[in-house]
Image (cartoon, helix red, strand yellow):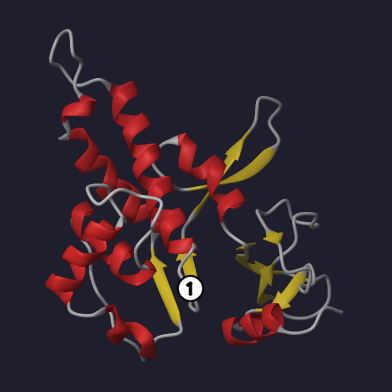
């Protein structure tokens, strides 16, 4: 059991990220996630010390968050053509990439908390008909850059061994037998780990093998 907040507005999503992650001193007061932004959200939500009782935060899902962000971006002046005043798709998706990367990076830098970003995978075919998987996120920039931002990329899947019953497992290493997205910056995980998130987090924080 835990507490849940449903987000349907991108400005609220940014405010919550600022509240959870704290102030970024590298940002100006008038910029998102800067000291001024953090002070405003604390005035609205209360002191950030309220969050000390939580050690893990789930964002479920970044697929939905990217759609909310895209709708917000479409209404911004930066997404309109200076010449015609009409929507500019290139500018819209450029703004989407900036917003999503800034949001995810700020959450990733949250001190003393586990931040889990949950997303869906799309199965696609490359030009040679070979299948590959990509994250279901609006715009290409976020999907391409996200694996470099986070410490771990883990895919939950069902494995079907030749002998025995199918079972769910986490795929955790970049080089794996399944062609699934994965990455382990900790150096502590095996290619296949049991589908138990608590044990996985304990192993990531544990001693190196």
**Residue 69 percent across, percent down from the top left:** 28, 46
Q: Nearer the viewer, residue 204 or 63?
A: 204
Residue at 41% in and 51% down: 26
Q: Position of residue 41 (x, y in %)?
A: 19, 66
- Identify whether 28 is placed above or below 8: above
Is residue 88 shown left or right of residue 99?
Answer: left
Rendering quarter of residue 188: bottom right
Looking at the image, residue 170 lies above or below residue 53: above
| Neighbour tally class for label 1: few under 14, some 14-19, many 20 plus, Cα within 10 Å | few
Q: For numbered disc 1, what is the local secondary structure?
A: loop
8 displayed left or right of 136: left
The N terminus sits in image quarter: bottom left
Q: Is residue 132 above or below residue 183?
A: above
Q: Looking at this rendering, what residue extends furthest in the top direction?
A: 83
| Left or right: 134 as drawn, with respect to 205 | left
> Label 1, on which residue?
111
Report the number of discs: 1
- The reply to whether residue 11 is visible in this rendering is yes
Residue at 23%, 27% in the rendered image: 79
- The answer to whether residue 13 is visible is no
Taking depth in this image into account, of 181 and 12 the one nearest to the observer is: 12
Task: Give percent across and percent down for residue 173.
Answer: 75, 61
- Relative to 71, does residue 208 appear above or below in the rendering? below
* Closer to us: 30 or 124: 30
- Residue 57 point in image, percent of width and height: 41, 76
Residue at screen point 26% across, 64% down: 38
């Amino acid at each position: 059991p835990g507490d849940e907040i449903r987000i349907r507005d991108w400005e609220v999503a940014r405010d919550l990220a600022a509240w959870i992650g704290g102030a970024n001193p590298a940002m100006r007061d008038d910029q998102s996630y800067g000291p001024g932004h953090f002070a405003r959200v604390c005035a609205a939500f209360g002191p950030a010390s309220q969050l000390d009782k939580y050690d893990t935060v789930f964002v479920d899902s970044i697929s939905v968050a990217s759609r909310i962000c895209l709708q917000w971006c479409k209404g911004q002046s930066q997404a309109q053509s200076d010449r015609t005043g009409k929507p500019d798709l290139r500018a819209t998706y450029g703004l989407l990439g900036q917003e999503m990367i800034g949001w995810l990076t700020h959450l990733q830098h949250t001190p003393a908390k586990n931040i889990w970003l949950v997303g869906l995978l799309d199965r696609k075919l490359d030009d040679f008909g070979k299948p590959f998987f990509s994250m279901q996120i609006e715009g290409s920039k976020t999907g391409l850059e996200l694996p470099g931002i986070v410490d771990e990329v883990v895919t939950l899947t069902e494995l079907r061994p030749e002998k025995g019953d199918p079972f769910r497992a986490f795929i955790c290493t970049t080089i794996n037998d399944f062609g699934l997205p994965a990455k382990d910056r900790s150096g502590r995980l095996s290619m296949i780990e049991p589908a138990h998130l608590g044990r996985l987090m304990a192993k990531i924080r544990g001693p190196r093998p």
